[in-house]
Image (spheres, rainbow, N blue to C red):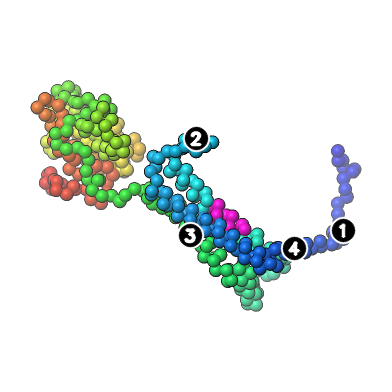
Amino acid sequence: MATRENLPAPVSEEGLGRFSNPGMAPHRPRRADVDEKAATRASTQVVVLFTISALSSIAFLVAYYVIDPTLKGSIIGIGELNLFHAVLGVTMALSLLGIGLGAIHWAKTLMPDEEVVEERHPQSSPQEDRDAVSQILSHGFRSSQLNRRSALLGSAAGALGLFALPMVVPVIAGLGPRPGGEMYTTHWKAGLRLRIDPSGAAIRAADVTQGSVFHVMPEGFVGAAQEDLPASEVLVAKAKDSVILVKLDASKIKSQKQRDWGYEGIVAYSKVCTHVGCPVALYEQQTHHLLCPCHQSTFDMTDDCKVIFGPAKRPLPQLPITVDGEGYLVAADSFREPVGPSFFERNRPGLLNAKDDA
């Protein structure tokens, strides 16, 4: 164990001068530095690696649009997996690996590897030093073989440029299609019975008591009926067609349009918040307020679901309802304005405009 007595004596400033500068080891030239064939072979290998990267990036894009995302397969030693994800992972890995290995091989075999010492100098460089830097950069460009081997620069640029596409294209494509007519339409239409979600039971108007709340879907898209539909269509219906049904005291309803589109105080409104599309499903019976749990937008059900608090900018669309010959609640029409978040156009072409509803 070291003690104060056996510690080495500190080196004085005079003693520092006794150590000579070891300098740098002499440069050992590589094979590519002295053999043109070796340099050409290394250049070809770098081009091949960059080309593999470029082809892998293209294969990624092709696979993204061609392979069925639900397709599954089995690989020995791994088991069953999703082929879509497997192909995307392998092609992206090869794209990145080709760039990495190509850059490393280029640096190790062709780029200058001599160690140099640069003396410190004042921060403000004179013009002759700037000229010297330009000459050094020019020399570096030439010594990196870019001026002689244009395939290096072209393949590297192609690999790096194409590698960005697998990062950008899925993000853009994942945003979905541009808004079209589907934002104006739902599955609701005149005559469809209102069915309780998720049981699918029909609702008889006489059985709805004041203060009752039902979460409903159109007939054919809930309960046992949805088992015959593609899963994607069911999800779309859940996103656009969800409706909340409430029976109010008719004397407290302020809007004539709300009375006309309801039935004996029973009114139905879209559950999709007009802010960002969250489900508006919290009903407060005493105040008759509907609350969106995401951003606390609050709607007054006695005043045509107008916004009284929060970031939403327009009322919830009302679904016109009536009863059929057996006394069950049915839709009298579809929604007469788009459901969901607000966007630049609200009125459905061919249906009632706001001025017609007044």
Of tags 3 and 1, which is closer to the observer? 3
Mark 4 / mark 1, whichever is N-terminal = 1
Q: Is residue 186 above or below residue 143?
A: above
- The magenta region covers 96-105
| Residue 147 shows in this picture | yes
Q: Quadrant of residue 231?
A: top left
Q: Which residue is mark 3?
A: 161
| Residue 305 shows in this picture | no
Q: Is residue 117 left or right of residue 17?
A: left
The answer to whether the residue labelled 3 contacts the one labelled 1, judged by CB atoms less than 8 Å apart, is no
Distance CA(mark 2)–CA(mark 1): 69 Å
Of tags 3 and 2, which is closer to the observer? 2
Q: Which residue is mark 1?
A: 15
Q: Is residue 221 above or below residue 38?
A: above
Distance CA(mark 3)–CA(mark 4): 35 Å
x, y percentage for residue 194? Answer: 19, 30
Q: Are there few (<14), some (14-19), or many (20+) residues within 10 Å of tag 1?
A: few
Badge 3 marks a residue whose secondary structure is helix
Distance CA(mark 3)–CA(mark 2): 35 Å
Residue appearing at x 58%, y 71% in the figure: 147
What type is the residue that disc 1 sits on?
Gly
Q: Is residue 131 magenta?
A: no
Q: In terms of depth relative to the viewer, which is nearer, 155 or 308?
A: 155
Seen as rendered, the residue at the extreme bottom is 128
Report the quarter where the C terminus lies.
Answer: top left
Seen as rendered, the residue at the extreme right is 5
Q: In terms of depth relative to the viewer, which is nearer, 282 or 154?
A: 154
Q: Which residue is mark 4?
A: 28
x, y percentage for residue 159? Answer: 51, 59
Mark 3 / mark 2, whichever is N-terminal = 2
Q: Which residue is mark 2?
A: 79
Residue appearing at x 31%, y 49% in the figure: 177
